Image (spheres, helix red, strand yellow):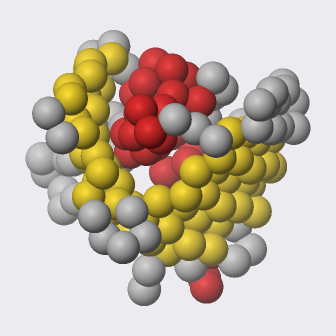
Amino acid sequence: MLSRRCFLVLGAALGAGCAARRTAPLVGWSGRLSLQVRSEPPQSFTAAFELLGDARQGQLQLSTPLGLAVAQARWGPGEAVLRSGSDLRRYASAQDLLLAATGTEVPLSALFDWLEGRPTEVLGWQPDLSGLSQGRLQARRSEPGPAVELRIVLER
């Protein structure tokens, strides 16, 4: 199981792919997400989330199943910041934040494409967008190891 710090960092990184565009309305998603990394030892977490933006700049709020806010991430060019209570962590990029949290890479740009229904290909990843019209997204990676499974259930 991911430590609380890793959980917060991971969530921030997933959101770090979001960007607030100054010329267009913010794109946003909310729902629940689950990430399983089949490492030794296996790591997993589940959280409610609110995500605004895209892969360049944005923000992510993570909450417990009961709605208690646990962390907020903001990112932009050259920096990703994670705040949890009074704890503040800075990373050079959203990818760095995510790698530090999970020990594995998650394709942030592709993730936002997948959320928008675009089947962007990423080496080793198999996105399943067939349930997107029902608010469900799954993506798996088998190679390179460790295997990773991401599940997202969007609110309507």
Can you say whether 35 is above or below 105 in the image?
below
In the image, what residue occupies the spot 42% across and 32% down? 5
Coordinates of residue 76 in the picture (x, y in percent): 24, 29
Coordinates of residue 147 in the picture (x, y in percent): 82, 37
> 126 and 152: which one is in front?
152
Coordinates of residue 110 in the picture (x, y in percent): 58, 43
Numbered circles on residues, count: 0
> 9 and 78: which one is in front?
9
- Describe residue 120's horizontal placement relative to residue 47 as left or right: right
- Quadrant of residue 12 within the rendered picture: top left
Can you say whether 152 is above or below 71 in the image?
below
Query: In this view of the protein, can residue 5 be seen by the observer?
Result: yes
- Quadrant of residue 61 within the rendered picture: bottom left
Can you say whether 109 is above or below 46 in the image?
above
- Quadrant of residue 75 within the rendered picture: top left
Quarter of the picture containing the C terminus is bottom left
- Describe residue 105's horizontal placement relative to residue 83 as left or right: right
- Describe residue 11's horizontal placement relative to residue 67 as left or right: right
Can you say whether 130 is above or below 148 in the image?
below
In the image, what residue occupies the spot 64% across and 66% down? 137
Query: In this view of the protein, can residue 27 be seen by the observer?
Result: no
- Describe residue 85's horizontal placement relative to residue 118 as left or right: left
In the image, what residue occupies the spot 64% across and 41% down? 1
> 90 and 94: which one is in front?
90
In the image, what residue occupies the spot 37% across and 20% down? 93
Coordinates of residue 131 in the picture (x, y in percent): 69, 77
